Image (tube, grey):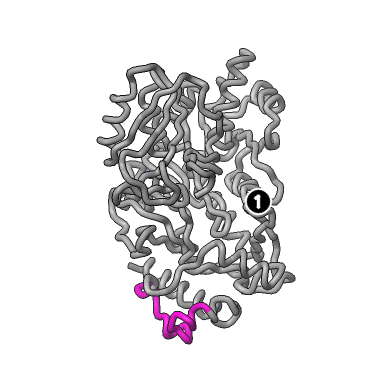
Amino acid sequence: MAHAAAHDAAYRAQLESLFARSAFYRRKLKAAGFPSAAAAGGLERLAGLPFTEKDELRASQAAHPPLGDYAAVGIRQAARIYSTSGTSGVPLYIPLTKSDVEDWRTIGRDTYSKNGLEAGERVVTTYGAGPFVAGASLAAFEAIGAVHIPVGVGNTERLLTAVQRLEPEALACTPSYAMHVAEVAAAKGVKLASIKRIIVGGEPGGGEDSFRKKLEDLFQARIFEIMGIGDIAASLWGECPEQAGMHFSGEGIIHVELIDPDSGLSKELSDGETGELVYTHLRREAAPLLRFRSRDHVRVWTSKCACGRGALRVRCIGRTDDMLIVRGVNVFPSAVREVVARFQPRVTGAIQIRPRARGVKQEPPLPVVIEGEAGVGEEVAKAIRAALLFTPEIRVVAPRTLPRSDYKSKLVAYPEGER
Ligand SMILES: [Zn+2]
């Protein structure tokens, strides 16, 4: 357990640093009954400390611009400042020191190596090198020694030309954009034969079986999913060639917990367990976060992967933000879509959940509208009951009736708009 001891020592040092340099955490921890780092103890007592919510970070940056009083360094000590798009139009700034940038590079290198990316391999990417943390991946490609071919966001023509002329072995982009590229290439009769590896991330979808199979068939290539979280680290999880979930790449740099999103209680990290990921930085300098709630709901595996790695694996189930509770059962709209998609081509795969009332808690049967052929409804309802343990009320409508959407859009339509 040398690892555990090292992690505990790093965590205690991180707490000392928070008490010394972060007014936000000093205040928060004192209010929770921990007047000092010593009083908060080590990692074994982490579950007794309060969570950090994204809204608190926004409020802190609004009250103490520009970096918020949770930041543990002044702006002049930052080496890089990313920002998120934010929902209210105000970006949330994510500062990194030189050492933090180096840690992100290490994490990204490990993640893309797990995907199988090698020195000399050509990888074409659509990542923006703009304000968003995805830009941090660029250093990871360099660290591996890959031949990186950036073509920018949304320029499909340039991407197809690059594929034809430079014959990259790998493509890295969002899952919905990969699907778009495959469709455009098919329509234009462009061959994508050089691409053997598609690395997808930035939005959910890459882990959904039916979506993945469709994309793999279209490209005749294998899909490898990655996942990061801006406030914690870019490219934090990456899938290996066994395609058995994404491996954790932040060992020794970030600590992971699993919680029940409703009660906030810790759950054991064990094979098959599900819950929300909660992160704690172990050695972040600029903006260390303690028990940060990711809102990412996952299934975890702790047993050794067939690839030989022991690192924790996850597969995303959905966002806790979108979750509904139907008579005590957690229902993720993306999971409903996945079950419905199994019935392709009798259904289009498009769905919309239409709760009768606003709010997270719903009474069964939960209305779900799907597109497809008449008569498929009862079979879909049966499959949903079996797989997701709640009773839906399926209404089948003609193809292309529901609003067309990408993977980031809402799959739930409430009777009076937002919940
Ligand atoms: Zn593996």
| Foreground pick, 380 / 247 | 380
Q: Main secondary structure of the magenta part?
A: helix
**Residue 254 higher or lower than 331, as above or below:** below
Percent x, y of residue 27: 54, 81
* Res. 309 visible in picture: no
| Foreground pick, 231 / 260 | 260
Q: Residue at x 35, y 50 (%)?
A: 300
Q: Which residue is mark 1?
A: 85
Q: Residue at x 35, y 49 (%)?
A: 325
Q: Amino acid at mark 1?
A: Ser
Percent x, y of residue 269: 32, 57
Count of all numbered marks drawn on residues in the image: 1
Left or right of 337 in this view: 69? right
Q: Secondary structure at mark 1?
A: loop
> Ligand 1 is found in which quarter of the picture?
top left
User: Does 89 lie within the magenta span?
Assistant: no
* Res. 402 visible in picture: yes
Quadrant assignment, res 369: top left
**Residue 7 higher or lower than 166, as above or below:** below
Percent x, y of residue 95: 66, 63
Q: Which residue appears farthest toward the right when viewing the image? A: 76
**Residue 326 higher or lower than 97, as above or below:** above
Left or right of 86 in this view: 257? left
Highlighted magenta segment, given as a residue range = 28-45
Q: Residue at x 66, y 73 (%)?
A: 73
Quadrant assignment, res 83: bottom right
Percent x, y of residue 217: 46, 22
Quadrant assignment, res 192: top right
Q: Which quadrant of the figure contains the N terminus?
A: bottom left
User: Does 32 lie within the magenta span?
Assistant: yes
Q: Residue at x 64, y 41 (%)?
A: 127
| Foreground pick, 138 / 28 | 28
